[in-house]
Image (tube, rainbow, N blue to C red):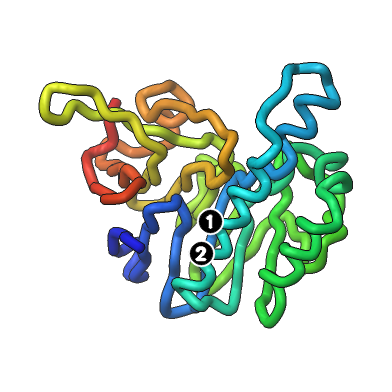
């Protein structure tokens, strides 16, 4: 499994190819915007039919990251489910799978704008989490420092060998990291769009994820 090591506020972190953030010193894996149950919600609301395998695919990749990193703490940065009913309709097999992933680990579900209600799948449900100098929350706060968040599903596009490459991306500057969406059925906001440009400093960088994560100045 490939990853790119970087330093944020004197903390050594790794951006994994999957979009997960690994903090080896604290044995922490942070993932954002799983959006489990999105296909079920689309069908329920009559918004079209998506292939019903996104939950299994997302959990498969998460299981692979946990096997690779062997972390003892998992932080899900909000919008872990596409809405509260999607969490309640996740199905016995997937609920059991999540319970197995949680076994022997401290597991935090951070509140998101899609899933503000209680999550009845084990773990701790919190508005935000402060851990050894970093604050983990769903949506970035402009006046924060040492913050890790999600919500925006950032993507970055660059020109490479005469073609345009677009990938989910971590965005980071002197005070914050915004993680890409981890879920299988998730769109994204381009790094040059106003909400992200307004949040990130002129010195911000992007880590494009995928088989070979790469670090570039944040495209604007």
What residue sits 67% from the left and 46% below the top?
Answer: 55
What residue sits 65% from the left and 50% below the top?
Answer: 56
Total labels drawn: 2
Position of 193 relative to 113 (above/below): above
- Where residue 149 sits: x, y (%)? 54, 49
Specify the label residue 141 is tagged with.
none
135 sits to left or right of 120: left
Identify the image quadrant of residue 22. bottom left
- Where residue 161 sits: x, y (%)? 11, 29
What residue sits 37% from the left and 57% below the top?
Answer: 15
Position of 120 relative to 50 (above/below): below
On the image, numbered disc 1 is attached to which residue?
61
79 sits to left or right of 145: right
Position of 195 relative to 77 (above/below): above
CB-based contact (under 8 Å), mark 1 and mark 2: yes
- Where residue 37 sits: x, y (%)? 74, 40
Tell me the SS state at disc 1.
Answer: helix
What residue sits 53% from the left and 29% below the top?
Answer: 187
Position of 36 relative to 107 (above/below): above
On the image, numbered disc 2 is attached to which residue?
64
Quadrant that contains the N terminus: bottom left
């Amino acid at each position: 499994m490939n990853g790119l090591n970087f330093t944020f506020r004197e903390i050594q972190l790794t951006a994994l190819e999957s979009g997960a953030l690994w903090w080896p010193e604290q044995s922490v894996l942070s993932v954002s915007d799983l959006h489990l149950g999105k296909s079920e919600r689309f069908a329920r609301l009559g918004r079209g039919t998506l292939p019903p395998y996104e939950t299994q695919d997302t959990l498969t990749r998460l299981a692979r990251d946990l096997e690779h990193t062997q972390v003892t703490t998992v932080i899900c940065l909000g919008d872990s489910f596409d809405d509260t009913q999607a969490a309640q309709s996740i199905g016995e097999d997937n609920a059991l799978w999540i319970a197995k992933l949680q076994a022997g680990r401290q597991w935090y579900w951070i509140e998101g704008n899609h899933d503000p209600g209680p999550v009845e799948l084990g773990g701790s449900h919190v508005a935000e989490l402060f851990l050894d100098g970093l604050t983990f929350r769903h949506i970035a706060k402009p006046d924060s420092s040492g913050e890790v968040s999600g919500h925006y599903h950032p993507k970055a596009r660059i020109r490479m060998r005469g073609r345009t490459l677009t990938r989910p991306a971590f965005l980071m500057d002197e005070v914050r990291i915004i993680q890409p969406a981890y879920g299988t059925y998730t769109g994204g906001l381009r790094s040059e769009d106003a909400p992200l440009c307004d949040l990130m400093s002129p010195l911000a960088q992007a880590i494009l994820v995928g088989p070979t994560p790469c670090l570039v100045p944040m495209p604007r």
